[in-house]
Image (spheres, grey):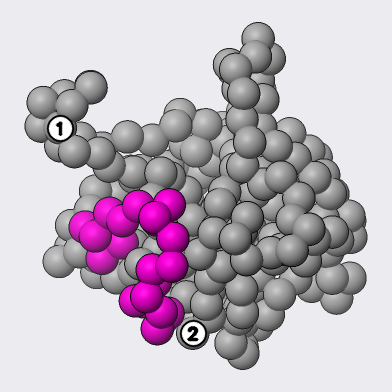
Amino acid sequence: MTQHKLFRPIIGVTLDSEEGGGFSDSPWYAIRQNYLSCLEEVGAVPIALPHLAELAEHYLNMIDGLVVTGGAFDVPPAMFGEEARTDTIRLKPARTKFEAAVLRGALERDMPVLGICGGHQLLAVIAGGTLVQHIPDEVAGALEHSVSKDTENAGGKERAGHSIAIEQDSLLAKLIGTTGQHVNSSHHQSVRTVKAPMRVTATAEDGVIEAIEHTGKSFAIGVQWHPEYKQMEGDVHLLAAFCAAAEAYHNR
């Protein structure tokens, strides 16, 4: 049962978007419900942020923490000084423009930030890092990071999954209480390099980077997996710690 509190931090959550077709003839926003419900369950008030880059500062004035979500799109290679080397890349310019603006603004304010999947990758790039454009093409002996198949389990999909090793001295390890965890996996790109003060804090057995954190900020963490599914106890700990950091940001 959710504990009721007089104050709850407000968390801005970025949306995905699609062009007209399917749900609506006009362009439309979308988000999985668990991106929002998982935050409500740990004591936050989640609000969805539309892709209006010119309003980024206004949104930042309203919120206490920022979640940059994943989605069916990629960070443009031009943002990390490369040309596209694969036809698997899908761009959503308006989304990326907004997320980059609001993420930069949050980091400048030392507002708590949690990047999930594509948000984790964008966090690395914003801080000067680079990406693997397509894991099967660039990582020798790669694990399966993106397979999904229809099944009666897991809400209709069975995702790939694997174990990760977490750096013992990292904030992530401190928050979730372990240096090893099984994670879900649904991505074809990954972080290749980070630039200090960003550091790598978790990797898969094939060397794919699974978590990063900004050592110069109070809470700026990116994870390649999807903790909003709360498949492991550590995921709940991470979300709760993020909510607590947002409350501390509000009260500072």
Q: Which residue lies furthest to the left in this view?
A: 26
Q: Assess whether residue 115 is covered by the magenta stretch.
A: no
* Residue 164 is at least partly visible in this image: yes
Q: Which amino acid does label 2 sit on?
A: Gly
* Residue 120 is at least partly visible in this image: no
Question: Which contiguous range is marked in magenta?
Answer: 77-97
Location of residue 75 (image quadrant): bottom left
Q: Assess whether residue 93 is covered by the magenta stretch.
A: yes
Secondary structure found at label 2: loop
Q: From the viewer's perspective, is residue 31 above or below residue 116?
A: above
Marks 2 and 1: in contact by CB < 8 Å?
A: no
Q: Where is residue 33 in the image (x, y as percent from the top left)?
A: 45, 29
Q: How crowded is mark 2: few (under 14 residues within 10 Å), some or many (20 or more)?
A: some
Q: Which residue lies furthest to the top in this view?
A: 152
Location of residue 192 (image quadrant): bottom right
Q: Which amino acid does label 1 sit on?
A: Gly
Q: Position of residue 25 (x, y in %)?
A: 11, 26
Is 219 or 61 nearer to us in this picture? 219
Secondary structure found at label 1: loop
Task: Tell me the residue that label 1 is attached to.
Answer: 20
Task: Tell me the residue that label 2 is attached to.
Answer: 128
Q: Tell me which residue sits at (15%, 32%) in the image.
A: 20
* Image quadrant where one finds the N terminus: top right
Q: How crowded is mark 1: few (under 14 residues within 10 Å), some or many (20 or more)?
A: few
